[in-house]
Image (tube, rainbow, N blue to C red):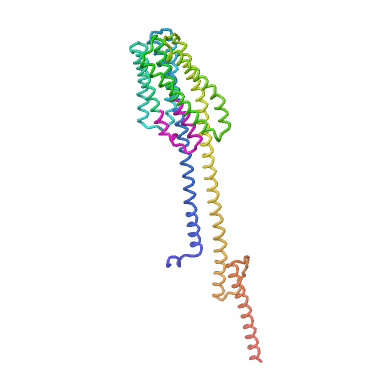
């Protein structure tokens, strides 16, 4: 208490104001930090969505390369030019992924894995062009390459935080667009490659028929998973729901048509008569429609994440501005309160000191009715009474002096 006793009123009030500001600053700081953390997480998701979506284009062209390679290695030389076109598009897609990865926060491990897959893309393409692979070997290497690229996609989704998105709509949309759709397209891509190889060779083994039947049943399951997550994502967004539902029936019809062709011309066929080029073109058209449909979902995902990022950025800016305004107002108001207390107190002290020194000529103005105002009023009354008393004493003294002289 000794320290407090040595402090004057203004110092005590200043300490009290600072203490109250610190108490208010703690929850405010926590709130702002939480908002900034959410903003950073959303920005990281937006950055991660770019390469994840670009990787799907790489997978799409690798799938086309796989199917066309199967036809070429099966003896169909007419697809050689088409294979060269696919390779050029694949190289462009790889360059886009490289550009997208520069803006994403991915680990050195994931970057290294991507570099390895780029090298494998080149090696497989060279081996197919030189016809150093059998059809089954080419299909197996392409399939392994796609599986590894999809693994990189999963790593990017995890490192960017997309798999842990806190909002239900974007969480389900991410699952549909970046997880379910690639699985659906890849399963159909494998059916395209296997079927093209069998039709080019003109024969279908029992093992090949069993593989096609297994993939046949998986396609419906993968498409169901994809549409279920799309439905969950669009429950609260009617515009998104309308955009996606308008094409879902078309995609489903194409898938059903392609599977029917596969069943009739391959799985149930006693003799393979369908030209490999027709089978390849039918599957390519269906898979391209799956990717086209999914691109709408992916675009909606990115737009939603970007809108959330902008809203959070605006919210953080507004909150910081309001906090700064509130802090400035609190400081200004605190100064006014401190001055409203200390200035009258200083005036009261000055009056008391003047009275104590015998000066009763002080002019005391009372401008408030609070505690300090009542103190000044009391000092004014005391000063006026002392002036009156001194006046009476002087008058009495003068009368005594006059009487003594008489």
Q: Is residue 374 left or right of residue 223?
A: right
Tell me if I can see residue 58 in this picture: no
Q: Quadrant of the C terminus?
A: bottom right
Magenta span includes 179: yes
Residue 150 location, quadrant: top left
Q: Is residue 360 above or below residue 282?
A: below
Q: How many marks?
A: 0
Residue 93 location, quadrant: top left
List x then y, in percent, for residue 73.
37, 11
Q: Judge by depth and name the residue closer to the eye, 11 or 276.
A: 276
Q: Is residue 48 above or below residue 31?
A: above
Q: Quadrant of the N terminus?
A: bottom left
Residue at 52 percent of width and 36 percent of height: 308
List x then y, in percent, for residue 266.
43, 13
Residue at 45 percent of width and 26 percent of height: 221
List x then y, in percent, for residue 75.
38, 8
Residue at 64 percent of width and 85 percent of height: 396
Q: Judge by depth and name the residue closer to the eye, 169 or 4.
A: 169
Magenta extent: 153-182
List x then y, in percent, for residue 22.
47, 54
Tell me if I can see residue 199 in this picture: yes
Q: Is residue 341 left or right of residue 199?
A: right
- Prevailing secondary structure class for the magenta stretch in the rendered image: helix
Q: Judge by depth and name the residue closer to the eye, 267 or 233.
A: 267
Magenta span includes 302: no
């Amino acid at each position: 208490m000794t320290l407090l006793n040595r402090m004057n009123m203004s110092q005590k009030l200043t300490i009290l104001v600072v203490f109250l500001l610190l108490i208010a600053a703690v929850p405010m700081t926590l709130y702002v930090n939480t908002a900034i953390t959410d903003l950073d997480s959303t920005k990281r998701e937006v950055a991660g969505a770019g390469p994840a979506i670009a990787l799907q284009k790489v997978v799409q062209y690798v799938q086309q390369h796989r199917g066309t390679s199967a036809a070429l290695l099966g003896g169909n030389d007419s697809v050689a030019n088409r294979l060269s076109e696919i390779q050029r598009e694949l190289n462009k897609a790889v360059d886009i992924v490289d550009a997208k990865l520069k803006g994403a926060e991915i680990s050195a491990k994931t970057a290294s894995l991507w570099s390895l897959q780029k090298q494998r893309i080149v090696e497989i393409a060279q081996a197919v062009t030189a016809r150093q692979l059998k059809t089954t070997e080419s299909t197996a290497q392409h399939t392994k390459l796609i599986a590894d690229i999809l693994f990189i996609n999963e790593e990017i989704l995890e490192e960017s935080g997309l798999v842990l998105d806190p909002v239900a709509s974007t969480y389900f949309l991410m699952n549909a667009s970046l997880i379910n759709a690639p699985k659906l397209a890849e399963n159909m891509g494998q059916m395209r490659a296997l079927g093209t190889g069998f039709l080019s060779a003109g024969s279908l083994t029992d093992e090949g028929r069993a593989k096609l039947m297994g993939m046949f049943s998986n396609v419906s399951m993968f498409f169901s998973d994809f549409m279920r997550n799309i439905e969950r994502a669009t429950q609260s967004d009617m515009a998104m729901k309308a955009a996606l539902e308008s094409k879902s029936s078309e995609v489903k019809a194409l898938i059903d048509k392609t599977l029917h062709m596969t069943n009739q011309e391959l799985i149930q066929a006693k003799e393979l008569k369908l030209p490999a080029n027709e089978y390849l073109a039918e599957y390519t058209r269906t898979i391209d429609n799956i990717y086209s449909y999914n691109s709408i979902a992916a675009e909606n995902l990115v737009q939603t994440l970007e809108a959330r990022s902008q809203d959070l950025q605006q919210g953080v800016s507004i909150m910081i501005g309001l906090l700064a305004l509130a802090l400035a107002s609190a400081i200004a108001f605190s100064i006014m309160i401190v001055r409203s207390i200390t200035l009258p107190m200083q005036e009261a002290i000055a009056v008391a000191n003047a009275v104590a020194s015998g000066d009763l000529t002080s002019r005391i103005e009372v401008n408030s009715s609070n505690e300090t105002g009542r103190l000044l009023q009391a000092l004014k009354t005391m000063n006026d009474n002392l002036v009156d008393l001194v006046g009476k004493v002087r008058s009495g003294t003068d009368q005594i002096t006059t009487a003594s002289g008489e």
